[in-house]
Image: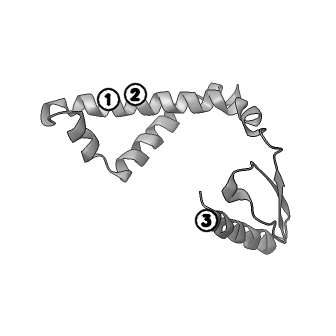
């Protein structure tokens, strides 16, 4: 994330809120790229310093589960390609952004609703 990207996204969100006649409060952490001004229809509320890790504790189980499934997908693909690759380097060099997105989608689909609820 960069300030330029975040500003661009906020401008888009603000235009959407104007179009819909709505106003939103967006709670964000103190990441340097988030240090921008509120918009007409998008008000930014910043977490206090050193608070993000406390707020994200509830996400830890979901993130861990996702990462575990993602790693499992990567290893499964690597093992499937053992007959045609010369090593881990060949496998890694052969991965594309599309492959990574595909692996992420498969991993996310594997995360159980029970994990998200908890």
Residue 92's image quarter?
A: top left
Q: Quadrant of the C terminus?
A: top right
Looking at the image, tell me whether mark 3 or mark 1 is earlier in sequence order: 3
Q: Position of residue 67 (x, y in %)?
A: 50, 32
Q: Which mark's residue is nearer the viewer, 2 or 3?
A: 3
The dot on residue 76 is 1
Q: Secondary structure at mark 3?
A: helix
Disc 2 designates what residue?
72
* Residue closer to the observer: 87 or 80: 87
Q: Quadrant of the N terminus?
A: bottom right
Q: Position of residue 103 (x, y in %)?
A: 41, 41
Is residue 29 visible to the viewer in this orientation of the structure?
Answer: yes
What distance separates the C-alpha of mark 2 from that of mark 1?
Answer: 6 Å
Q: Which mark's residue is nearer the viewer, 3 or 1?
A: 3
- Residue 21 higher or lower than 68, as above or below: below
- Residue 83 higher or lower than 90, as above or below: above
What distance separates the C-alpha of mark 2 from that of mark 3?
Answer: 32 Å
Residue 36's image quarter?
A: bottom right
Q: Is residue 110 left or right of residue 2?
A: left
Badge 3 crowding class, 10 Å Cα cut-off, few under 14, some 14 to 19, many 20 or more, is few
Disc 3 designates what residue?
5
| Marks 2,1: beta carbons within 8 A | yes
Q: Is residue 60 left or right of residue 22?
A: left
Q: Is residue 65 left or right of residue 85?
A: right
Looking at the image, tell me whether mark 2 or mark 3 is earlier in sequence order: 3
What distance separates the C-alpha of mark 3 from that of mark 1?
Answer: 35 Å
* Residue closer to the observer: 105 or 67: 67
Residue ID at (37%, 52%): 98
Q: Secondary structure at mark 1?
A: helix
Residue ID at (80%, 73%): 18
Q: Position of residue 105 (x, y in %)?
A: 47, 43
């Amino acid at each position: 994330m960069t300030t330029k990207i975040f500003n661009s996204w906020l401008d888009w969100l603000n235009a959407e809120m104007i179009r819909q006649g709505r106003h939103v409060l967006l709670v964000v952490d103190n990441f340097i790229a988030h240090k921008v001004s509120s918009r007409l229809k998008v008000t930014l509320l910043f977490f206090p310093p050193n608070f993000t890790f406390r707020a994200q504790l509830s996400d830890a189980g979901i993130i861990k589960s996702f990462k575990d499934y993602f790693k499992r997908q990567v290893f499964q693909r690597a093992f499937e390609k053992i007959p045609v690759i010369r090593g881990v380097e060949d496998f890694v060099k052969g991965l594309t952004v599309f492959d990574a997105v595909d692996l992420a989608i498969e991993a996310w689909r594997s995360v159980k609703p029970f994990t998200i609820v908890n």
